[in-house]
Image (spheres, helix red, strand yellow):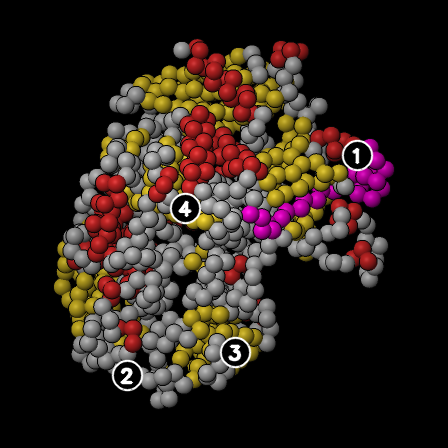
Amino acid sequence: MKAPRILLSLLFSSLLLQAHALIPTDRKQRLTEHWEFIRQDMGSIWEVMRPITGAGKPETVPLWQKVTLPHCFNAEDAVDPDVNYYQGPGWYRTMLNIENPYTNGRTCLEFEGAGQKTEVYVYTTRIASHVGGYDEWKADITEAVEAFRRTPLCRERFGGKIPIAIRCDNSRDTELIPSDMSDFNLYGGLYRYVNLVYTPAVHFEQIRIEATTDEKGKQGSISIDIAFGGLSGKEKKAKEFSLRVFSPEGKEVNSISSELTEISSYQISLKRPQLWSPHSPALYTCVAELIDNGDTLRTTQHFGFRHFRFEEKGPFYLNGERLLLCGTHRHEDHAGVGAALTEEMMRTEMQQIKEMGANFIRLGHYQQSGIILRLCDELGLLVWEEIPWCRGGLGGESYKNQARRMLTNMIEQHRNHPSVILWGLGNENDWPGDFQTFEKDSIRAFMGELHDLAHRLDPTRSTAIRRCEFCKDIVDVYSPTIWAGWYGRRFRNYREMETAGINATTRFLHAEWGGDSHAGRHMEVNKETGGKGIDNFDIEAADRNGDWSESYIIRLFDWHLKEQETMPRLTGSLFWTFKDFSTPLRPDNPIPYVNQKGVVQRDGTPKESYYVFQSYWSSKPMLHIYGHSWPVRWGKPGEPKEILVYSNCPEVELFVNGVSQGRKKRNSQDFPAAGLRWNVPLREGNNKITATGYDGKLRLDDEIQQEYQTRTWGKPSRILLTQTAQNAETILVQAELIDENGIRCLDACLFIEFGCTDSEALLRNQGTAQGSLRIQAANGRASIRVNKQHAPVVVSASDSKRILKTALISVSGQ
């Protein structure tokens, strides 16, 4: 048993020379405040650092903007309908008060991710650089800080503080991954946290923890490998080292004290360990401490016991039991901030995913923040994480080296997370375009190299790719492209298409399915109505060329989910995607530059489809009447209208205008809405619709108000602006398309463009249904929010084709 551990230690030691990792210490300072930013290049580092001698002097131009971190170059322009998003350099600067408490200690800047190429300066001295926008890395500034402190300039001009400058650059470069052909923005900036870290001269470099069990879970084994930095023979004796392991309840289960070596390996046995799973994400804790002359360096690592396997031809097993993987995807993107999400924002998003009932997530298409991985560990979400080799083909040696390095970094940085089960090697690598030649054999050879590298680094996990048929035999798990009802055939063909994929693939997993939906757009499903346009075709025949209504997409999701419940060989699937996100490839979408395949909007506001998934996946009782974002329905007088309720309660009762429409029992195979549907005539004008769900003694209630319109409409002849609602900070202004008789045109889908006498007053460039200057009308309506602090203002609305007269409204803020 010793030989393999020695070989592992040698491999571990060699990897430390090439892999970046965050510094294992609990003592870190997030540098969020007191930053300045400029979105352009500078002539030299001296231009960044030269003194400002007074207003109007050359040194005061260009102007720097005060910002907080995380910060993204493209917080707004990624979804600005009128410009291309910025790709180029930008500079950040700050001054740090550095006080390392350790004698002969090291001082580092730690980057959790910065895009896409980064350089670090102490005053005018370049200290470090990094290529790659998604992996973690550090810059040791110890010597540069001490050298600058010895200069008179440090004391006389900077008051003893240390000036730091950082240059980020997201310029287009075909020899970098990911490709600019990718269907997402390659953001620029310090869009993840930057930390100031102090360590003693002898410190932790990296900690690997591998927790395994036998198939029955009766015996657990913990292998811990710790790499130390700064060791010398003299210092080994001066230090004390201890290692303690705690159960999920906080009880100490093992402790070790030992002398230091450059690589220290430890084996711990544990009987009947608690197993980590989505249902019960039991996390053990490892606390390692270095003590020297009263100074303690502590690092805390969490880990879990679990074992899994993908059966040939399915299904998937976790801890010896079949688990249907119910998954989604996540991009690092949010309204108003781009990629610069705070930890609080990340936690809110991941909790939304868990509350939806998901147990699996693919972090596409790049390594994501370590905060996300920790949240997946805590919440119980299995993870497929991948490197950003996405589209475009295969570049030269520097391109390949970046892919190798990012794969190595991703595995070394995130291997301790029990949530991770798949290392992704690429995405849509059959997509050419960045280079004059596209050689499948070269791509196959490099894919094979990455597969072998991943298994050398981590033999405990599987490799995966999506959509590259000529490489599907190389990786352990493969996902073909199957988009039933969107990019091919109808959604009722899903089972047939999925079965064919399972039969054609050794280990099959279905990543990416679903379709776009424009929040607030709905259709009537009755084929004969008094309305116009969007209700006059078979709803099940729609696809990406249809109207992108929420009415269609809930049916597509509903059909897939009910089918998946009766497919015993299915490992699982991951629908695309959880949240709408920005993309430079879709300027003509209803919300320009937004991929609208999410079940929540770009700001996290749920669409109707979120509750469809929750009704199938969540174990927590829930109830939701379809149509919370559908204020006006239409049809003939007295015509029955379909009302859907999505719930996991065994029984639901519906009331319309106070009258019970009867109880129905839930049956997941009764499509749509698992049998919880009623056809009820609505009265003209306002209707109150309520539902009550029964789950034993528990009762759940939901309510919506819908107006019913029976008058038919003609072509839009004008835009009507109204102030409809407000909250503490904003006022909602709605534009409605009206015909010549004053009737709302409920099928109108013109693009509406908003303007204002104060350009800062509008909530703009959010990529949401109420935060976009240019947006396609949904059921004849479009809205935008106005900041109360800027009122009074005048808001305008016009159609993009300038067919109708521009409408104006005065917004007072009262």
Q: Nearer the viewer, residue 229 or 374?
A: 229
Q: Quadrant of residue 289?
A: top right
Q: Position of residue 588 (x, y in %)?
A: 45, 66
Q: Is residue 154 magenta?
A: yes
Which residue is disc 1 drawn over?
149
Q: Report the residue at 52% width, 17% height from top.
A: 10
Q: Position of residue 388 (x, y in %)?
A: 48, 43
Which residue is disc 3 drawn over?
796
> Residues in magenta?
148-174
Nearer the observer: mark 3 or 4; the answer is: 4
Q: Amino acid at mark 3?
A: Ser
Which residue is disc 2 drawn over?
712
Q: Secondary structure at mark 2?
A: loop
Q: Nearer the viewer, residue 727 or 67?
A: 67
| Mark toward the start of the polypeptide (3 vs 4) | 4
Nearer the observer: mark 4 or 1; the answer is: 4
Numbered label attached to residue 430 = 4
Q: Position of residue 382 (x, y in %)?
A: 36, 38
Q: Amino acid at mark 4?
A: Asp
